[in-house]
């Protein structure tokens, strides 16, 4: 009996309508002498423009396909647009909190 853990990219999706996010799914399967053992597990990570380093999974964060897609789709312009979007959301939240305190 030889158990090994096999990790692979299960899916990479570009979500243009979600601030140009990239959603990645990692599939993990335990194998016993090359045959699946038990059910696979899945882990998903949504990567926003400029935030690949924030993905908590080393396999996804360092995968050459993920790095290449993020490098292509997360252009400096899209990173700037996303940062502006986040800042506007924070400003609205602060304004809302300040207004509700009065």
Image (cartoon, helix red, strand yellow):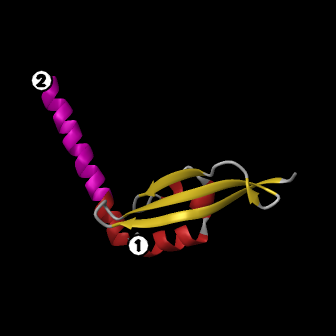
Residue 14: x and y, percent? 39, 67
Q: Which corner quadrant of the image does residue 90 belong to?
A: top left
Q: Which mark is residue 86?
A: none
Q: Residue furthest top?
A: 102
Residue 92 part of the magenta segment: yes
- Left-right relation of 94 to 8: left
Residue at image point 68% right, 48% down:
38
SS under mark 1: helix
- Residues in magenta, as a range: 83-102
Q: Which mark is residue 102?
A: 2
* Residue named by callout 1: 73
Residue 39: x and y, percent? 64, 49
Above or below 76: residue 91 = above
Q: Main secondary structure of the magenta part?
A: helix
- Left-right relation of 15 to 94: right
Residue at image point 23% right, 50% down:
88
In front: 12, or 95? 12
Q: Which corner quadrant of the image does residue 6 belong to?
A: bottom right
Determine the CA span between mark 1 and mark 2: 43 Å
Above or below 87: residue 52 = below
Residue 97 part of the magenta segment: yes
């Amino acid at each position: 009996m030889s158990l090994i853990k096999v990790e692979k990219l299960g899916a990479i999706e570009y979500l243009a309508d979600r601030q140009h996010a990239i959603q990645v799914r990692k599939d993990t399967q335990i194998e016993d002498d090359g045959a699946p053992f038990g059910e696979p597990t899945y882990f998903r990570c949504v990567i926003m423009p400029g935030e690949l380093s924030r993905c908590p999974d080393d396999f996804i964060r360092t995968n050459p396909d993920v790095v290449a897609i993020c490098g292509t789709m997360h252009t400096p312009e899209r990173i700037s647009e996303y940062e502006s979007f986040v800042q506007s959301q924070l400003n609205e939240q602060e304004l809302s909190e300040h207004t509700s305190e009065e």
